[in-house]
Image (cartoon, grey):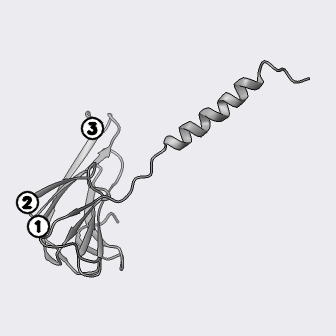
Amino acid sequence: MICLFRIPYFFALIVLGIVIGGCATYQETEAYKLYSGPIRSSTEISILQLYDASKAVIDGMSVSHSDYTEVHLSPGVHNITWTSVHGMSVLVEASGFALKHSEQNPILLKGRIYRLRSARTTGHEYTIYNWIEDLATGEVIAGTAKP
């Protein structure tokens, strides 16, 4: 026998699920244009995805991953300094976090997408690796990838 008292609660749960599901947000790519002049097509610029970097300074301009997911640049040599943050056991790092700062001067080619990457080893003798990867080729163009 169906209890009529529970039916409104069942429908309320369904409506609540729909409302919560509707509030979920999709993070679109937010790009920071770091060149002068009008907007250019992706085949004319270099795209640098912040990916594993919490923040970066590119040619003296600070960009935070919380504000932008990628930076659009003129092709050529760029000074890129970035920081990656890794959660750690408090038994390894008292703060619970480990930071790695890197500075590179890669040559970025037009029409290419690059990604700031970071990975770490585990344990008390951990090592953090930061590198810049060309997404088209998978090649490390600057820094050292985790073996």
Q: Quadrant of the N terminus?
A: top right
Determine which residue is flagged by label 3.
93
Residue at disc 2, secondary structure: loop
Measure how far apart labels 1 and 3 are at the Cα level: 30 Å
Image: 145 above or below 87: below
Choose the circle earlier in sequence order: 2 or 1: 2
Determine which residue is flagged by label 1.
79
Q: Position of residue 75 (x, y in %)?
A: 18, 78
Which of the 4 image quarters holds residue 69?
Answer: bottom left
Q: Which amino acid is tagged 3?
A: Glu
- Disc assigned to residue 60: 2
Q: Position of residue 70 (x, y in %)?
A: 28, 62
Name the foreground residue: 76 vs 119: 76
Choose the circle earlier in sequence order: 1 or 3: 1
Tag 2–tag 1 contact (CB < 8 Å): yes
Which of the 4 image quarters holds residue 118?
Answer: bottom left
Name the foreground residue: 108 vs 42: 42
Q: Which amino acid is tagged 2?
A: Gly
User: Closer to us: mark 2 or mark 1?
Assistant: 2
Q: Position of residue 49 (x, y in %)?
A: 29, 64
Residue at disc 3, secondary structure: loop
Choose the circle earlier in sequence order: 3 or 2: 2
Q: Quadrant of the C terminus?
A: bottom left
Count of numbered labels shown in the rendering: 3
Crowdedness of circle 1 by 10 Å Cα count: few (<14), some, many (20+)?
Answer: few
The residue sitting at 63% across, 34% down in the picture is 15
Image: 132 above or below 16: below
User: Closer to us: mark 1 or mark 3?
Assistant: 1
